[in-house]
Amino acid sequence: MTRAGGSGAGAGAIVLDHGAASDIGLTRSHNEDAYLAAPPVFLVADGMGGHEAGDVASRTALAAFAPHIGAPEITGDALVECLGRAARDVDALGADRDPLMGLPGCTLSGVVVTSIDGRPCLRVLNIGDSRTYRMTPDGVEQITVDHSEIQELMSSGRLTAGEAQASPRRHVITRALGAGIGPVALADHFLIPARTGDRLIVCTDGVSGEIDDDSLAEVIHRGQGPQETADALIATALGAGGRDNATVIVIDVTHAPSAVPGTAPDVDRTTIPSTKHDTLPRTREQHSNKENPS
């Protein structure tokens, strides 16, 4: 298990504390997950494409954000540049690779510190089925929306949450970086006003696929620090089966400027691209199955 933790000041008066952990799981031979947890960037990536493809893809995607470590924030323009570089670099990994061996690709999800009209805030971004949650007084709120066939079936009412857990298609995603789709980075963006006391959880599906929302809420409400919580979430995922690589970042907002009433919604979802822009065409779904890559 690898671990990292620390604290730092984000844009303006935002101060964050965080912890992170990753584990290969109980059934996999190598870890295709990667994370970057250093202010102002907190991201996880889940690789696909097989050994020496998925793990390289996930690390490559995160490397595009590394130059901003230690900066007070990531501007909107800089974020677009980072996503574009991640898409180009991951796509380039498959240039000389046989598609039948699995093309490199990865998901991407997490939080960056930014500002809107001079006011510091948090921006959640997502490509694929890794997830970002926020702790609420009563449980957890999933901020991101999975880009997966299962999510589409659930959203249309054709599949229940219980049926989704047992579906053999639960690993088929509809958006990714790389995986043979070209240098495209179509990310959902969610703007969140930072609030003192907020806790966010960023994880790959090796965590969210093993831990249901009630169990997730129980762990993150224990009152432990972010590193202890990250370790506990990994331990819970392993205890539930550990069938996949598991990676998590826990972020606590320890100080943020007071909110101005009426200035911003709780979560601004207006920046979500339409699902008609999926980056993985259904005729190429073999490249999007993370559990059984072609």
Image: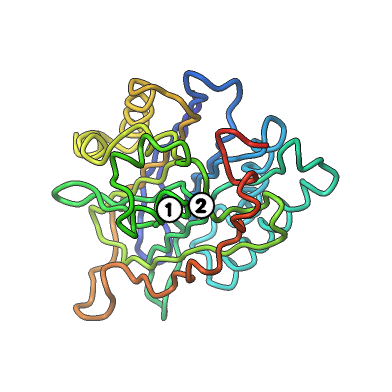
Q: Is residue 40 above or below residue 206?
A: below
Residue 71 location, x and y as percent?
Answer: 54, 59
Name which residue type carries label 1. Answer: Asp
Q: Residue at x 47, y 59 (%)?
A: 125
Q: Which residue is mark 1?
A: 146
Kindly indicate the quadrant of the structure image that contains residue 21. Answer: top left
Secondary structure beneath label 1:
loop
Kindly indicate the quadrant of the structure image that contains residue 59. Answer: top right
Camera-nearest residue between 236 and 195: 236
Contact between marks 1 and 2 (CB within 8 A): the answer is yes
All told, the count of numbered labels is 2
Q: Which mark is residue 246?
A: none
Residue 121 location, x and y as percent?
Answer: 37, 67
Image position of 274 (left or right of 53):
left
Label 2 CA crowd tier, 10 Å (few <14, some 14–19, many 20+):
many
Name which residue type carries label 2. Answer: Gly
Label 1 CA crowd tier, 10 Å (few <14, some 14–19, many 20+):
many
Residue 63 location, x and y as percent?
Answer: 65, 48
Secondary structure beneath label 2:
loop
Q: Which residue is mark 2?
A: 128
Image position of 136 (left or right of 239):
left
Whichever of labels 1 and 2 marks the residue nearer the N terminus, that label is: 2
Residue 11 location, x and y as percent?
Answer: 43, 64
Q: Residue at x 77, y 46 (%)?
A: 93
